[in-house]
Image (cartoon, rainbow, N blue to C red):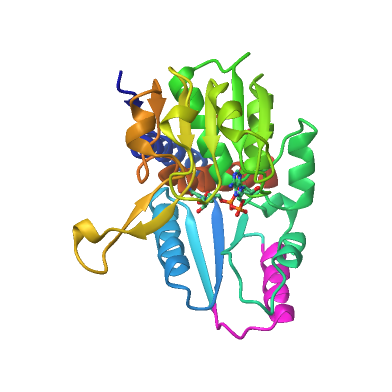
Amino acid sequence: MSAQRIDGKAIAENLRGRIGAAVGALEKAHGKTPGLAVVLVGEDAASQVYVRNKGIATKEAGMTSLEFRLPADTPEAVLLDKVRTLNADAAVNGILVQFPVPDQISQQRVIDTIDPAKDVDGLNPLNAGRLVSGLDALTPCTPLGSVILAKETLKDLTGKHAVVIGRSNLVGKPVAQLLLKENCTVTMAHSRTADLPAICRSADILVAAVGIPEIVKGDWVKPGACVIDVGINRIDAPEKGEGKTRLVGDVDFAAAEAVAAHITPVPGGVGPMTIACLLRNTLTAFCRQNGFVEVEV
Ligand code: NAD
């Protein structure tokens, strides 16, 4: 058996199209468009690519994109002031500070300073707490995208045993909460879990968010499972030539593909969903801040 590849790129494009249509309709009705502010501190190459791609996607969805680039030696107080200014700006509905930030800045203080209503990354403790409590919350983008992929593939997740490997605030914990909301029975595994392969083998839905290339082997996957690989790892690829690299996930794709029923590739699986969900959160924040009926996309 060879698993069906879950086409995250196509599902994300579809979602972005629906978001763009909703933004157009809201502009027609109210004469306003959502505004997303992205703040980048320093020159990190990967972060620059992410920020550029977010800006392009924001504009393509008909939203206003505001970009602020601060030097790498920006003091924490200056960045926090910038965030407070954006909190107070009515034209800004979503704020994203690109992580990682340089060492002189506390990531947690940045997260704590962003207005929870504009926290489109869903990392502020108020949003994290609301998610756990089953209340409306802005939810971290990658977890949201991962669970949308599982739902698009399996439709009803009720009663499925989901195993989530990784317990970060950014991915593992919110993925587990979202799966719980979908009526899954959720097991959280992590670096101290005993007999990880056996636990993984009991999963109908296996979500890997570890950051270790291909840690999940083919014989960790239950036949017929749905595998969502969140990992993005760059490894050497001498077969492509000297000094070349390639991206792999946390799952040994070729081996898992032979066992699973559905699997996300890396790249082209969860990755594209992250930006689509950022736009979705910005649309949600815009509607809530303006008292507009929330659009289901
Ligand atoms: P993290 O380092 O914060 O957390 C990793 C988690 O893995 C930890 O909770 C840890 O307990 C667990 N872990 C570590 N070693 C383990 C082991 N040997 N066995 C079992 N569990 C182990 O990482 P993160 O921010 O949660 O990201 C995880 C992965 O997802 C990374 O590869 C990251 O690049 C990727 N990621 C992708 C996207 C995307 O857009 N697709 C977004 C965010 C993160």
In the picture provided, is 94 more to the left or to the right than 237? right
Q: Which residue lies furthest to the bottom in this view?
A: 73
81 part of magenta stretch: yes
Q: Is residue 33 visible?
A: no
Q: Is the magenta stretch mostly helix, strand or loop?
A: helix
Query: What residue do we see at 56% from left, 64% from top?
Result: 98
Q: Where is residue 260 in the image (x, y as percent from the top left)?
A: 40, 23
x and y, in percent, of residue 121 in the image: 62, 52
- Residue 150 among magenta residues: no
Total label count?
A: 0
Residue 178 image point, x, y percent: 65, 31
- Which of 186 and 181 lies nearest the eye of the viewer? 186
Quadrant of the rendered image containing residue 219: top left
Q: Nearer the viewer, residue 295 or 158?
A: 158
| Boundaries of the magenta span | 70-89
Q: In terms of depth relative to the viewer, which is nearer, 10 or 172?
A: 172
Residue extending furthest front?
195
* Image height of 37 relative to 154, above or below: below
At 44% from the left and 22% from the top, the residue drawn is: 153
Q: In this view, does 119 lie above or below 276?
A: below
- Residue at image position (56%, 82%) is 72
**Residue 296 spot, x, y in % from top left:** 55, 29
Quadrant into which the N terminus falls: top left
Residue at horizontal 58 percent and vertical 64 percent from the top: 99
Left or right: residue 27 versus residue 288 is left
Residue 185, relative to residue 220: is it above or below? above
> Is residue 173 something one can see in this rendering?
yes
